[in-house]
Amino acid sequence: MALNEELLKILVCPKCKGEINLNERRDGLICNACSLLYPIIDEIPVMLIEEAKPIVVEKHE
């Protein structure tokens, strides 16, 4: 069972209240504004700021 699309439409980042998107591996939700990844465990998004992992953005020169 996949994460409910309707749920994805209403979820926001708990830190900045901005938009979040499902990552490519479909195992987390990304907030680009905060550079955080909120994990999805057993098909349940864990929307706790203290459980989020920072996203490292590589800069190409």
Image (cartoon, rainbow, N blue to C red):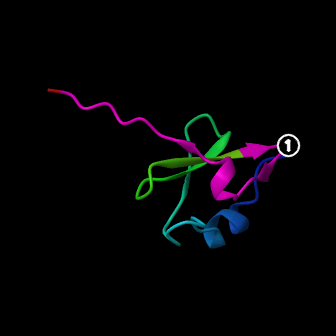
Against 26, residue 30 (above or below) is: below
Q: Position of residue 29 (x, y in %)?
A: 60, 50
Q: Position of residue 8 (x, y in %)?
A: 66, 63
Question: Is residue 14 a member of the stretch shown in magenta?
Answer: no
Q: Which residue lies furthest to the left in this view?
A: 61
- Give the quarter of the image for residue 10: bottom right
Q: Which residue is drawn at 71% across and 68% down?
A: 6
Q: Where is residue 17 in the image (x, y as percent from the top left)?
A: 53, 72
Say which element carries label 1: loop
Q: Name the residue under label 1.
A: 42
Q: Residue at x 40, y 59 (%)?
A: 33
Q: Position of residue 9 (x, y in %)?
A: 62, 69
Q: Residue furthest front?
A: 50
Q: In this view, does 9 lie to the left or right of 7?
A: left
Q: In this view, does 50 lie to the left or right of 37?
A: right
Against 10, residue 31 (above or below) is: above
Q: How many marks?
A: 1
Against 30, residue 47 (above or below) is: below
- Crowd class of label 1 (few under 14; some 14 to 19; many from 20; radius 10 Å): few
Give the quadrant of the C terminus: top left
Q: Residue at x 49, y 69 (%)?
A: 16
Question: Is residue 50 a member of the stretch shown in magenta?
Answer: yes
- Give the amino acid at mark 1: Asp
Q: Which residue is drawn at 32% across and 30% down?
A: 58
Front residue of this view, candidates 48 and 61: 48
Q: In this view, does 34 lie to the left or right of 44?
A: left
Against 26, residue 45 (above or below) is: below
Residue range of the region highlighted in magenta in the rendering: 40-60
Q: Residue furthest top?
A: 61
